[in-house]
Amino acid sequence: MREGATAVDTVTLDGPGILTIVGKAMVASLFWYSAIFDMAAHWPAAADFVAGRGLPAPKALASAAMLFEIVAPAAFLVPRFERWAALALAAYCLLTAALFHDFWTMPLDDRGDADFHFFKNVALAGSLLLLERDRRRRPGAADSPT
């Protein structure tokens, strides 16, 4: 935050502050939806999916992924943690794209939505990196402890 600025000064209804908050909440909602409605609602199938990829401790990994998909997007909404949350979410998107949506290893008829989800994750990671870059350009960002 700029020196002498208050939280009210940095979040205005007519300025980029509200757009940043709404945009970040929209990004966060994708992760929350995945954790709740894709993973938790389909347990133990989510752990079985991880096991099917040959990863160790599939229940622990799937549980950790659900927790991450709830906590990291929440941290992304908090200015003090947004940098590290954005970078962690971007890395997570790239990791899950490579591990779980490797469409290039599948016969064309078996790809289903794997190619779409791969590129969605890559695009989301790129968006998070752009948000991080833009965060550093905001007034007062140099004063930020993150």
Image: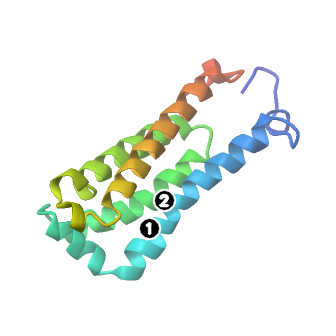
Q: Position of residue 69 (x, y in %)?
A: 44, 59
- Front one among 121 and 69: 121
* 39 displayed left or right of 37: left
The colour scheme used here is rainbow
Q: Seen in the image, is 138 located left or right of residue 36?
A: right
Picture layout, residue 34 above or below residue 16: below
Amino acid type assigned to the residue bearing label 2 in the image: Phe
| Image spot of residue 94 (x, y percent) | 33, 44
Whole-percent x, y for residue 21 in the image: 70, 46
Rendered residue at 38%/57% (across/down): 117
Dot 1 and dot 2 residues touching (CB under 8 Å): yes
Residue at image coords 39%, 56%: 116
Q: Quadrant of residue 103?
A: bottom left
Q: Which mark is residue 35?
A: 1
In this rendering, would 38 be left or right of 9? left
| Residue labelled with disc 2 | 31
Question: Which of the pair 113/1 is nearer the observer?
Answer: 113
109 or 13, nearer to the observer: 109
